Amino acid sequence: MLEKMGEFFDSRLDIYDEHQLTCIEAAREFYPFTAGLLPRGAGCRVLDLGCGTGLELESYFTLNPDARVTGIDLAPGMLAALGEKFPGHDLELVCGSYFDVPFGEGLFDAAVSVESLHHFTQAEKVPLYAKLQRALRPGGYFVLTDYFAATPDVERRRREELARLKRKQGLAEGTFYHYDTPLTVDHEAEALEAAGFARVEKLRAWGDTATLRAWA
Ligand SMILES: C[S@@+](CC[C@H](N)C(=O)[O-])C[C@H]1O[C@@H](n2cnc3c(N)ncnc32)[C@H](O)[C@@H]1O
């Protein structure tokens, strides 16, 4: 049974952090690795897409307690839990879809997203990434740590299965449901480049999770 994206995460809030850290291969490595790539300067600005309860921010605020972070997420419960974790930090939380929320232009030193963007197609991501690229300062970059499809065939089959489930449940287009439809790393890099990012690097992989860095 497909569930709406925000409701899916909020209804699992009590087990969320433990599940992420124990059930995803190498999660205890990739959260600190991702955070370690973010800028260290005092007061630098970072945008987090799909911040959830902020597992990536736990490591980041340890490395850079003075960072100014804007986190966007669809799930109000996840955001409330995140807000309680980091009192005293410069953390702005925006409840909404990163497809709809304006990011501004030239504002952020870096952006990050962990385990959130594997639900969307290339066609949905290109305009999102173009908006993100414009939100970064010159020399800025986007760090994406996410779940990727091992092959184009896996990518296609997951997408077909989502379409089948939506038809079966009579669900309309235009609402996000929780079902993993990861792109391959190559297709993700294509979307980032099509959106205007100058260069995309694949930095590390752990099973189906990889970290990419895209330079604005
Ligand atoms: C698996 S959690 C990852 C949270 C956090 N980054 C982490 O790694 O622990 C995915 C998060 O992405 C959020 N999300 C999914 N689609 C979104 C969208 N279109 N806009 C904003 N948030 C979204 C979900 O609500 C959820 O909190």
Image (cartoon, grey):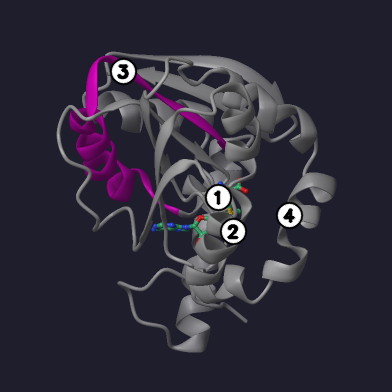
Q: Residue 127: say if magenta.
A: yes
Question: Which residue is drawn at the image coordinates 26% and 40% (left, top)?
Answer: 126
Q: Nearer the viewer, mark 2 or mark 4?
A: 2
Q: Is residue 28 visible?
A: yes
**Looking at the figure, which quarter contains the N terminus?**
bottom right
**Could you tell whether 130 is left or right of 48 in the image?**
left
Amino acid type, mark 2 = Glu
What mark, if any, has residue 140 been given in the picture? 3
Q: Looking at the image, is mark 2 or mark 4 earlier in the sequence?
A: 4
Structural crowding at the residue carrying mark 4, measured as other residues with C-alpha within 10 Å and reported as few (<14), some (14–19) or many (≥20): some
For this orientation, the residue located farthest to the bottom is 170
SS for tag 4? helix
Q: Is residue 24 above or below residue 134?
A: below
Q: Nearer the viewer, mark 1 or mark 3?
A: 1
Calculate the distance from the C-alpha at mark 1 to the C-alpha at mark 3: 27 Å
SS for tag 1? loop
Instruction: Name the spot of residue 138 as percent of width and height, x first.
Output: 21, 14
- Residue beneath label 1, please? 87
Mark 2 touching mark 1, by CB under 8 A? yes
Question: Which residue is drawn at the image coordinates 53% and 57% (left, top)?
Answer: 83
- Residue beneath label 2, please? 84
The magenta region covers: 120-146
